[in-house]
Amino acid sequence: MEQSHVLQLTHEPLPIVRIGFIGLGNRGMATLRRYLAIDDIDIVALCDINSTHLAEANALLSQDGRYQPQIYDTANGWRTLCERKDIDLVYVCTDWLTHTPMACYAMEQGKHVAIEVPAATSVEECWQLVDTSERTRRHCMMLENCIYDFFELTTMNMAHQGVFGE
């Protein structure tokens, strides 16, 4: 089967986005807190091999009261999370070396994926993400937000003004 790019890939809007989190360390917990401010989501599952991270995340969600996530705490729990039929989006916030395999597996299971930086650690892994997204027709997004910080925007403006030459 010939693949086609995903540059204009669209899907029907989901009334409720059902999310599974893999990795709840520092950045994962910070993101989980931010997600609590978003309407029209359901946090369906949490996965981490560190029981302290899971306990903190579960306590936060219990305090909020809206979510009753399934907990996965084994080394391969992330696979079981990805295989669930009631998850639309998998958020990957683990160590760098597992981002690409986890994201590709999630897309293979029909899930859209949001990956913390870096999404990949080699050009080969970048192509694995692109090829998997094209083949499965699932969105795969690297969650980088510092491009809008002061330093980055200043540098971009300087480049547009020709400060650096050609």
Image (tube, rainbow, N blue to C red):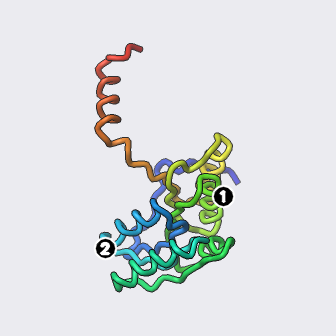
Q: Secondary structure at mark 2?
A: loop
The quadrant the N terminus occupies is bottom right
Q: Could you tell me how far apart the alpha carbons at marks 2 and 1 are, in whole angstroms?
A: 30 Å
Q: Secondary structure at mark 1?
A: helix
Q: Which residue is mark 1?
A: 101
Give the residue drawn at x 65%, y 63%.
Answer: 105
Give the residue drawn at x 32%, y 17%.
Answer: 163
Q: Position of residue 68 (x, y in %)?
A: 45, 86
Disc 1 residue type (three-letter) = Pro
Give the residue drawn at x 43%, y 48%.
Answer: 144
Q: Is residue 16 above or below residue 29?
A: below
Q: Quadrant of residue 76?
A: bottom right
Q: Is residue 54 above or below residue 68?
A: above
Q: Position of residue 18 (x, y in %)?
A: 45, 75
In this view, the residue farthest toward the right is 1
Q: Is residue 140 above or below residue 161?
A: below
Q: Is residue 163 above or below residue 87?
A: above
Q: Which residue is mark 2?
A: 39
Q: Which mark is residue 72?
A: none
Disc 2 residue type (three-letter) = Asp
Q: Position of residue 4 (x, y in %)?
A: 59, 49
